[in-house]
Image: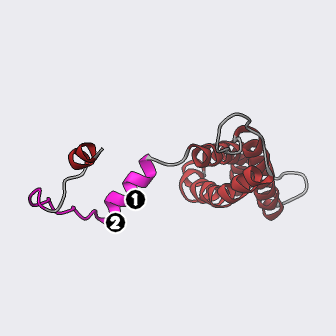
Amino acid sequence: MTAQRDRAAPGPGAGPRAPVRRRGFIEIRWRQFRNAPRPVVRAVLSSLGVAVVLGLPFLAYDVALSRGVSLPGGDLRALAILALVVAVLVVGSVVTYLIVPQATGHGVRRGRSPWSAALGFFAAVPIVYLVLVVENQILKPLFV
């Protein structure tokens, strides 16, 4: 047993050890990005998909109003943004609840929990904001 321990980890008399290289901030963040947990990736991608699909009709509505097309009901962009945000939060939470199983220690039974829906909700908040920014700042000027 001691022979295995001696071979596995060199003791203090085994010679000098190489110093541990310190990683920079960007390198650490890039490694975290590449090795993101699967449930988080699923939650973000489901919220992104929902936000893009529901954001395209809003973009079309916004471009039509900006071009001077008169639509029934007048200018309801604020209500449309509110509906988009609520829809993305709710649908993103439900989709994440359905596709992200609850982690278990032994892997025998995988169930669902409200925490999956909470993960989807908190992933949807920044995603819907970013989709609205991209639509209004990048895509809308291309069509107007």
Q: Which residue is identified by label 2?
A: 25
The residue furthest left is: 15
The residue at 45%/47% (across/down) is 35
95 and 75: which one is in front? 95
Rendering colour mode:
secondary structure
Q: Is residue 132 one of those drawn in magenta?
A: no
Q: Which region of the structure is painted magenta?
A: 13-34
Compared across the picture, whether 20 is left or right of 119 comes to left
Work out which residue is located at the far right of the displayed protein and give it.
73
Viewed as shown, does residue 71 lie left or right of 63? right
Do callouts 1 and 2 mark residues in contact (Cβ within 8 Å)?
A: yes
Q: Quadrant of the N terminus?
A: top left
In the foreground, 49 or 16: 16
The numbered dot on residue 48 is none
Residue 68 seen by the camera: no
The image position of residue 37, as x and y in percent, is: 54, 47
Task: Estimate how packed mark 2 is, as few (under 14), some (14 to 19) or many (20 or more) residues with alpha carbons within 10 Å.
Answer: few
71 versus 16 height, above or below: above
Is 14 magenta? The answer is yes
Task: Give the spatial CA distance, label 1 vs label 2.
Answer: 6 Å
Asked where in the image residue 14 lies, by quadrant, the reply is bottom left
Amino acid type, mark 1: Arg
Q: Name the residue beneath numbered marker 1.
A: 29
Badge 2 marks a residue whose secondary structure is helix
Q: Point out the residue furthest to the front here.
A: 1
What is the secondary structure assignment of the residue under circle 1?
helix
